[in-house]
Image: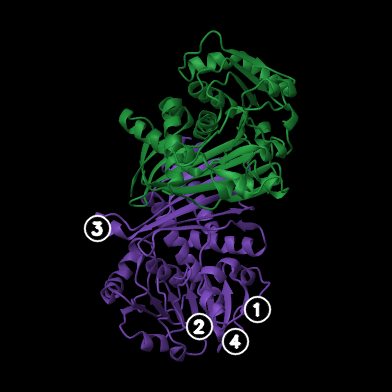
Chain colours: A green, B purple
Amino acid sequence: MSNVRILNAEETKKLLSMSDVIHTVEQVYSEKAKGDTVVFPLVFHEFDPGHADMDIKSGWVKGADVFGLKLVAWFEGNKQKNLPMLSGTILVCDGSTGQPVGILDGAYITGIRTGAAGALGAKYLARPESENLLIVGAGHVATFQIAATLMLMPKIKKVRIYDPIVSEGAKQMADSIRETLVHDFKMTIAEDIVFEAVEDVQEATKKSDVVITVTPAKSPIILKEWVKPGTHFSCIGADMEGKQEIDGTILSAARIFVDDVAQNCNVGEIELPLKDGLISKKDIIGELGHIINGVAVGRENDEQITVYDATGTALLDLLTGKLALDMAEKQNVGVCVTL
Amino acid sequence: MSNVRILNAEETKKLLSMSDVIHTVEQVYSEKAKGDTVVFPLVFHEFDPGHADMDIKSGWVKGADVFGLKLVAWFEGNKQKNLPMLSGTILVCDGSTGQPVGILDGAYITGIRTGAAGALGAKYLARPESENLLIVGAGHVATFQIAATLMLMPKIKKVRIYDPIVSEGAKQMADSIRETLVHDFKMTIAEDIVFEAVEDVQEATKKSDVVITVTPAKSPIILKEWVKPGTHFSCIGADMEGKQEIDGTILSAARIFVDDVAQNCNVGEIELPLKDGLISKKDIIGELGHIINGVAVGRENDEQITVYDATGTALLDLLTGKLALDMAEKQNVGVCVTL
């Protein structure tokens, strides 16, 4: 019998601040690059290919003495049932005893930790004076990308939002994001920062210093000839075989970092360029954590194109979950059960 | 947000009757043999080889519209901490929406469904007039094996219990099992049924019609020359690479059934005999479910030695978990949370 705390999405949302989550993700990247974590093999199953699938990501963060898993299910048909298409559950276990300590909704944590991941890519690889941010894909995760990137890149003046499928979604996000950042993320957003929905991704790319892609695309949305020297890309959307958001020739010209070499090669943005022979494994300089730990050099000059390809590991969910559980204990939030 | 019911070990124990679980396990075997289930790949990690490990079993039972997982952790050092060495958590999800519906302690369910599995091996493969049952290994799961086998094999008159490591454990079990069966399992045990701890496994094997092995052994406890014609073995203990409970030559002389061909070949009782060349894959007649469905013939005559090698799949945990959740809903048991 062990005491297990249960936290739902509303509770994790109240408990987690973006700055704490950024700090946690940075710490996980650092520990991973030191070899102090293990990512267990991914389990993936398609119930109805293209319409319903699930995956189980799991792993162990030695330093934090935590292991566990996240199960994420995506059911397209939930739209008709008025249910969220994506649902997730995180199980956090104690690394010294094996016993479960917490069960959390996985949707909010996935969003916030993924926002932190994309923004950390920019922090460590983009030019520090970057002023123009382009967000490609105006879905759920985009909000978190904008929040985290504005925190870490204080010189950003313009945020362009493009959605390759629902342009109305980009407009809605541009209209409401300031309010969301102030209200939900307790951020102070300078008056001169402009949020703008765009319909011409070619033009927008040409003007951008930092591009964050968060779409489920299976073919490139951004072409090489639109990219100006010195641009940084955080590619977040590709997390499954066959996904791709930017042209492979951008990668062959770029300095590339990843979050988990094995996983990125199988399911990340680099998967198809690797298979197509546009890049080879030796073009992967390392993990972002290697830059954080000072054992790899990130951007080498202002002309270089840089790419951070983040596929997401359970390590992020587990430590973000643990952070929420620790806060919840102090504040007495959630339901405690004896399991 | 979905409504999730949480059930701990005490609650699942009260909700689940052995006869209902036997029925459920039989149903899962039947559906699996028809191809109506999917066992997802096993995730296994040793934190400290031989002292601490965990595994994640997962799968999908189409007919019952349920998928999910069981995480089991084993930490030897918990003994010193006065904590159970084994802990487990089951997550049951709705197969139509992907959303979590229940979270259950996995320890009791693992015990009871494993008891049902071993006993179903005897029901479908042992001689119906079998009177002598030998249980090898007097641990936690042995109680469930005895309960389920006495339910399914009504002519059993003598139950011998042997423990290869702690002979005192076998004595304690023999002394207390009648009371446990009557009290915990609500069974009526005829006065003439004898429970006896034995120290000579050779002698005991010679007298047995049904042998159920539930140990963590890594080398054979039972040798071929002790086995009388017509004996049935349910081999339950081997569930990890390198485990083995009975001599490989028993298998080469036996009619063999399994619960999941791929998994048994990797981690079951048949693993080492296959690797040693004592048997080949064509010696595996099929799954127990094929007999249940009437598409395979079990025992062919009274002299044949039969083996049921059960490694255990998440399918059993998920449907036994679902059974407990359905009962709990009717009886309003457990804690309901919005996750």
Q: Position of residue B324 (x, y in %)?
A: 47, 50
Element on which disc 1 rests: helix
Query: How far apart, in angstroms, are the residues tagged by discs 2 and 1?
Result: 16 Å
Query: How far apart, in angstroms, are the residues tagged by discs 4 and 3?
Result: 50 Å
Which numbered tag is attached to residue B248? 2
Name which of mark 2 and mark 1 comes first in the sequence.
2
Looking at the image, do the residues carrying marks 4 and 1 touch, with CB atoms under 8 Å apart?
Answer: no
Dots 4 and 2 on the same chain: yes
Type of amino acid at the residue the image marks with label 4: Asn
Q: Dot 3 surroundings within 10 Å: few (below 14), some, or many (20 or more)?
A: few
Q: Dot 1 surroundings within 10 Å: few (below 14), some, or many (20 or more)?
A: few
Type of amino acid at the residue the image marks with label 1: Lys
Element on which disc 3 rests: helix
Which chain does tag 2 point to? Answer: B
B219, B124: nearer the viewer: B219
Residue under numbered circle 4? B301
Which chain does tag 4 point to? Answer: B
Name which of mark 3 and mark 2 comes first in the sequence.
3
Which numbered tag is attached to residue B282? 1
Which chain does tag 3 point to? Answer: B
Q: Is residue B71 left or right of residue A204?
A: left
Name which of mark 4 and mark 3 comes first in the sequence.
3
Looking at the image, do the residues carrying marks 2 and 1 touch, with CB atoms under 8 Å apart?
Answer: no
Dots 4 and 1 on the same chain: yes
Residue under numbered circle 3? B80
Which chain does tag 1 point to? Answer: B
- Foreground tag (4 vs 1): 1
Looking at the image, do the residues carrying marks 4 and 3 touch, with CB atoms under 8 Å apart?
Answer: no
Dots 2 and 1 on the same chain: yes
